[in-house]
Image (cartoon, rainbow, N blue to C red):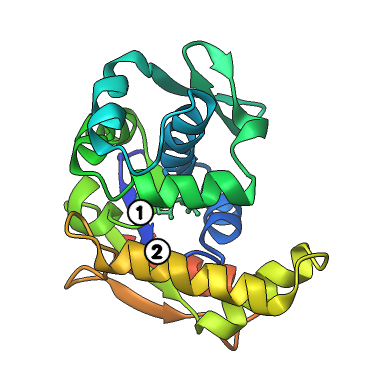
């Protein structure tokens, strides 16, 4: 739609629909979707795989230089590599979700991962989602959107994807992760001052995607 390089930052709590919405919007706009949660998940997975206690911050910090993380897009799908091993299919479990959220609160982990996120956005137009994209990673992003929905609605969406886990448990996990992501000292989840707030509680996926595309078109005058 345009030849200039631009960035779209999408932040919000777990389960607000960020990744599905951002992936589809990226396809429609013909730009790359960058899932930064997958990067934190890769560290969370690496820490578990190395048998490091999640409470042992010093050990996690010592381990970081040994975690060579990279990403690549294969058939349009973002793959994560840990020391050259493709770990894409290992990072989606509930255990890794929780581990990712714990390691993401460690300042050294965030610092270690910051530059690789900025680097992707330097070379091409991206739609990047996470928790601190508009506030920390890409504060100069042309479009900033904060996607949210109530904890109950987000838990219900998650639960419909994995009905074998009781709804109450899923809701509890959502609330715990929100608390950790929003109340950590470094780069807590919050909207940037100039983020457009988009509440998806009453919107289905298609409506949410259209809402995001409309915001992008308006901001970029496409
Ligand atoms: O979006 P997700 O559920 O895949 O993210 C996994 C964890 O990583 C989440 O609990 C918060 C953390 N995260 C973060 O702190 N900053 C980001 N930019 C992306 C994710």
- Could you say whether the residue bearing mark 2 is in a helix, strand or loop? helix
Q: Nearer the viewer, residue 14 or 65?
A: 65
The disc, 1 or 2, on the residue closer to the chain's N-terminal end is 1
Count of numbered badges drawn on the protein: 2
How far apart, in angstroms, are the residues tagged by discs 1 and 2? 8 Å
Residue at the disc numbered 1: 8
In the rendered image, residue 139, in percent from the top left (x then y), is placed at 17, 53
* Residue that mark 2 sits on: 216
Residue 133 in view? yes
- On the image, the x and y values in percent for residue 80 come to 53, 27
Using the image, determine if residue 122 lies above or below residue 18: above
Q: Is residue 68 above or below residue 48?
A: above
The residue carrying pointer 2 sits among few (fewer than 14), some (14 to 19) or many (20 or more) residues within 10 Å by Cα, namely some
Instruction: Please identify the quadrant where the C terminus is shown.
Output: bottom left
Q: Is residue 17 left or right of residue 31?
A: right
- Contact between marks 1 and 2 (CB within 8 A): the answer is yes
Query: In the rendered image of this protein, does residue 121 appear above or below residue 7?
Result: above
Q: Is residue 119 visible?
A: no
Q: Which element type, helix, strand or loop, lies under badge 1? A: strand
Left or right, residue 146 beside residue 186: right
**Which residue is at the front of the view, 113 or 170?**
170
Residue mark closest to the camera, 1 vs 2: 1
Label 1 Cα neighbours within 10 Å, binned few <14 / some 14-19 / many ≥20: many
The residue positioned 41% from the left and 52% from the top of the image is 101
């Amino acid at each position: 739609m345009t030849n200039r390089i631009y960035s779209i930052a999408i932040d919000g709590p777990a389960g607000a629909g960020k990744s599905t919405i951002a992936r589809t919007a990226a396809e429609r706009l013909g730009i790359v979707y960058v899932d930064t949660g997958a990067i934190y998940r890769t560290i969370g997975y690496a820490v578990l795989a190395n048998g490091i206690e999640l409470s042992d911050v010093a050990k996690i910090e010592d381990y970081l230089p040994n975690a060579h993380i990279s990403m690549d897009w294969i058939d349009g799908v973002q793959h994560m590599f840990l020391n050259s091993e493709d770990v894409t299919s290992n990072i989606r479990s509930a255990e890794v979700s929780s581990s990712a959220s714990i390691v993401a609160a460690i300042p050294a982990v965030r610092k270690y991962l910051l530059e690789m996120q900025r680097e992707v956005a330097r070379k091409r137009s991206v739609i990047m989602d996470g928790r601190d994209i508009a506030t920390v990673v890409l504060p100069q992003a042309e479009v900033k959107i904060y996607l949210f929905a109530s904890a109950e609605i987000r838990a219900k969406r998650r639960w419909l994807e994995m009905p074998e886990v009781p709804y109450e448990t899923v809701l509890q996990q959502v609330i715990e992760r929100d608390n950790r992501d929003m109340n950590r000292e470094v780069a807590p989840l919050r909207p940037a001052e100039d983020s457009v707030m988009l509440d998806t509680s009453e919107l289905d996926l298609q409506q949410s995607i259209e809402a995001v595309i409309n915001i992008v078109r308006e901001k970029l005058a496409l």
